[in-house]
Amino acid sequence: MTETKDPVEGLSSRERHAKDAAPPHDEARVPRVVAAAHVAVAHGTQLKMRAKDLSVRYGEKVAIRDVSIDVHANEVLALIGPSGCGKSTFLRSLNRMNDTVPGVGVDGHVELDGEPIYGPQVDPVLVRRRVGMVFQRSNPFPKSIFENVAYGLRIAGVRERSVIAERVERALRHAAIWDEVKDRLHESGLSLSGGQQQRLCIARALAVEPEVLLMDEPASALDPIATAKIEDLVSNLRSELTIVIVTHNMQQAARVSQRTGFFYMGKLVEVGDTTTIFTRPKQRDTEDYITGRFG
Ligand SMILES: Nc1ncnc2c1ncn2[C@@H]1O[C@H](COP(=O)(O)OP(=O)(O)OP(=O)(O)O)[C@@H](O)[C@H]1O
Ligand SMILES: [Mg+2]
């Protein structure tokens, strides 16, 4: 199907019509969620992203090799594995963030809704709008709380002040931080606590309404209370989007994810239902890792 994409928001004409017709508040997203859930119930899992034989090199050094994995719609997929095994490299290849690293080489395929994201016709900026990312260390801009969240919308060409204000509020609510910041929206994002800054960064990523959110150890620098808030948030966001989360914390993977993939030395060793991976893994390396024998 050859649908034209809106150059500003990266939406197909069909998506734009649906969006324009939708009411301008939270309920606007409900039909898509219900539709996705319906498909999942009716036909089993729905595929959101697929990596096939994906390899990534930094210069001569191969960081991941022949990784094939499916990401299901509205799931939380956790990626675990020892330091240096390629988790972040893999995550960045799902929204072409690796393109920004000099000397990187990517082979293989990644699809989003069945369409390849690598390829001469594809604009990586639009891919990143649909597949957002949150990093290990929160990195608010030295701007107000409001402007941190509005940033992506302004870059995307959204001009109308009421639309921006409405979407900033919606994103802050989705990131479970609205009540804490609603009376201080014009203070600096840097004035927030570490846990609040991380939720602000999640709000910033959510403001452009991504379909997939990639999270690279989003809670590893946070205390247990802030971590619990991020975990609750991840669990709640799943009804609206698809999440791939890298974590070193296996309890966290067990708490928030439905499926888990174990990486080791640049390879995906196995992926499966989270309970199965943590109780009856098929591979010896997975068992050794989850029982703490290495890594
Ligand atoms: N920008 C880069 N340039 C060169 N090599 C890199 C770069 N980023 C990662 N690597 C290498 O690629 C391999 C995989 O790194 P990656 O960061 O993906 O691992 P990781 O599993 O996320 O590790 P960690 O758990 O420590 O974050 C490592 O050997 C790393 O040194
Ligand atoms: Mg990493």
Image: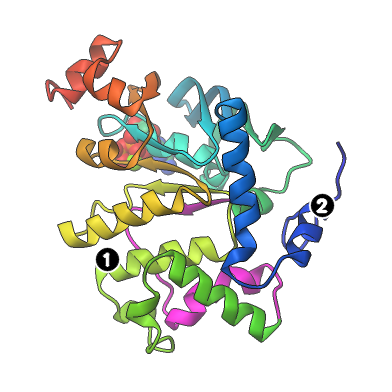
Q: Which residue is mark 1?
A: 195
Q: Which residue is mark 2?
A: 14
Left/right placement of residue 88 relative to residue 56 reads left
Picture layout, residue 188 above or below residue 9 = below
Which dot, 2 or 1, sits closer to the camera? 2
- Residue type, label 1: Gly
Magenta stretch contains residue 134: yes
Q: Please give the name of the residue rendered at 27% of the width and 41% of the height, measured from the top-left corner.
A: 255
Q: Please give the name of the residue rendered at 57% of the width and 67% of the height, measured from the top-left corner.
A: 26
Looking at the picture, tell me which residue is in the foreground, 155 or 254. Answer: 254
Task: Specify the quadrant that holds the N terminus.
Answer: top right
Question: At numbered mark 2, what does the secondary structure look like: helix, strand or loop?
Answer: helix
| N-terminal-most mark, 2 or 1 | 2
Q: Please give the name of the residue rendered at 66% of the width and 73% of the height, measured from the top-left corner.
A: 24
Q: What mark, if any, has residue 251 been given in the picture?
A: none
Q: Residues within 10 Å of mark 1 (few under 14, many from 20)?
A: many
Q: Is residue 139 visible?
A: no
Q: Tell me where the magenta segment starts and ends, as one range.
A: 131-159
Q: Please give the name of the residue rendered at 78% of the width and 65% of the height, measured from the top-left corner.
A: 21
Residue 230 sits in quarter? bottom left
Give the Cα distance between marks 2 and 1.
38 Å
Would you say the beta carbon of the disc 2 residue lies within 8 angstroms of ligand 1? no
Q: Is residue 93 visible?
A: yes
- Residue type, label 2: Arg
